[in-house]
Image (cartoon, grey):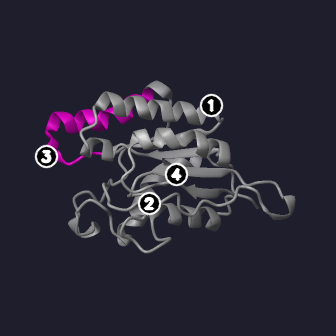
Amino acid sequence: MLAGTAFGPAAVHAALAANGAPAKPVIVVLGDSISAEYGLPRDTGWVALMRQRLADERIDYSVANASISGDTTSGGRARMPELMERLKPSIVIVELGANDALRGVPLSTTEDNLRTIIEQARQGHAKVVLIGMYVPPNYGLDYTQKFHGLYGTLSKEMHVPLVPFLLAGIENKPEMFQADQIHPTQQAQPALLNNVWPTLKPLLHPATR
């Protein structure tokens, strides 16, 4: 998740359709390198696969991937006002926090930042999906459990749908990770999408006919 180069807010699609047609509702993914396709060919990450699944199921949304490699909850919090103003999303998927842990950010700071991001989204009338993560066990079992637990706490307190763990199902499969054993491979991306989709889909408008 910590990476030397920023992917940037990739694939941010214009919200307004051509010729004055009504704008599609927008899904913004606010994440770090796991959502920013770090080490992957362009347009092969789970966010790109989500965009394709929406199209395949004729669910009329555009997707803005505002993920940046190495980003923290503080960075996401700082970027949220501009993203909300520019893109006016209907849904914000928040995949942040792991880099906080890798940098030793206090858990209380991470929780406060995530809480504020959720509030910022709601102030802009957007629904929120929160994605939980674990950190490596070398931080100690107590820290690992408390870090993961803060996502569940926020989900319950703020009534936000939660994806318990983005990497569920691949976490014990080294072949599904790049050489750093942190970032999932291209082959793992469908599993990530399948972890997110059941939580996201109920928030979407029905498929068009």
Residue at the spot x=26%, y=59% of the render? 182
16 in the magenta segment: no
Q: What secondary structure is found at the residue carrying circle 2?
A: loop
Residue at the spot x=13%, y=39% of the render? 140
Counting labels gives 4
* Amino acid of disc 3: Asn
Mark 2 or 3, closer to the camera: 2
Q: Badge 4 is on which residue?
A: 29
Spatial CA span between label 1 and label 4:
17 Å
Residue 138, label in figure: 3
Residue 36, label in figure: 2
Q: What secondary structure is found at the residue carrying circle 4?
A: strand
Tell me which numbered mark, 2 or 1, is placed earlier along the sequence: 2
Quadrant of the rendered structure where residue 173 is? bottom left
- Of residues 203 and 122, which is closer to you in this image? 122
Tell me which numbered mark, 4 or 3, is placed earlier along the sequence: 4
- How far from the left and from the top, in percent, is residue 5? 37, 62
